[in-house]
Amino acid sequence: MALFDRIGRLFRANLNDLVSKAEDPEKILEQAVIDMQEDLVKLRQAVARVIAEQKRSELQYNKNTEEAQKWQQRAQLALNKGDETLAREALIRKKTHSDTAAVLKSQLEQQGAQVDSLKRSLISLESKIQEAKTKKNLLQARSQAAKASEALQNTLGNIGTSSATAAFERMENKVIEAEARSQAAAELGGFSIDQQFASLESSSDVEDELARMKAALSGSSPNQPALPEQNKDKLQDL
């Protein structure tokens, strides 16, 4: 038995969860108002039936009351004429109608109380339906706003993984890579020019050193300008 109870409880729990997930607040609220309006129609029909029965009872009560009065008058007439037997028969008829009128009067009082109660219930239900309609519109608006907000949040949450955003990220990476290559090429080009000037400066130092060595061998200063050939011959003659 315990196993079957657990299975039954599990089935009911799963069924309730399924129903809860399937419930749409807007549709449920709409259906709730429809159900209340149907109850209102049934209540109005019930009130109409009770009022109709009350009217019939009232007619019957008035009729029996009139009949009782009529037979009272006939009994009096018969007694005045000295016919006690006829007077007695008229009083019997009067009693029958009077008893019926008394029963109908009690019934009318009960029906009147029932009609009053049903009318109060009718007014209360109409007020509740109006309140439910107002609340339904408010809750439906809140439900729609919540759905829109949820859809927006889901959209924002999926932006990071969307193909469009991934494409933008890839293109951004390509631009960054191209900028890095361009900067590297510029730096490499500037370094090559510096090397060329450094090479020129280095070769100039070597040439200067070579000139000094040659001047030392010839006994002249490397900064002294070379003499013309005629001056050299005059110096040799001296």
Image (cartoon, rainbow, N blue to C red):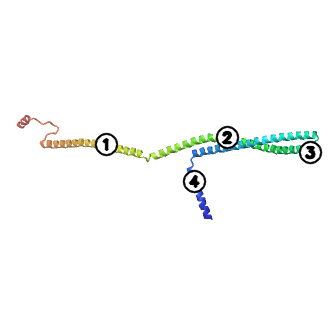
Percent across and percent down for residue 97 are 84, 44
- The crowd level at tag 2 (other Cα within 10 Å; few <14, some 14-19, many 20+) is some
Indicate which label's residue lies in the foreground, 1 or 2: 2
- Left or right: 104, with 221 as reference point: right
Label 3: state its secondary structure: helix
Tell me how far mark 4 sits from mark 3, CA to CA. 83 Å
Percent of width and height locating residue 53:
75, 43
Determine which residue is flagged by label 1.
182
Query: What amino acid type should be assigned to the residue bearing mark 1?
Result: Ser
Q: What residue does disc 3 label?
A: 85
CB contact under 8 Å: marks 4 and 3: no
Q: Distance between the residues labelled 4 and 2?
A: 33 Å
Of the numbered discs 4 and 3, the one sitting upstream in the chain is: 4
The x and y percentages for residue 100 are 82, 45
Disc 1 from disc 3: Cα separation: 139 Å
Classify mark 1: residues with Cα within 10 Å, few (<14), some (14-19) or many (20+): few
Query: Quick one: label 1 or label 3, which is nearer the N terminus?
Result: 3
Q: Name the residue under label 2.
A: 126
Distance CA(mark 4)–CA(mark 1): 62 Å
Q: How far apart are marks 2 and 3 (CA)?
A: 61 Å
Lower position in the chain sequence, tag 4 or tag 2: 4
Q: What element carries label 1?
A: helix
Quadrant occupied by the N terminus? bottom right
Helix or strand or loop: what does disc 2 sit on?
Answer: helix
Mark 4 = which residue? 17
Residue 139 marker: none
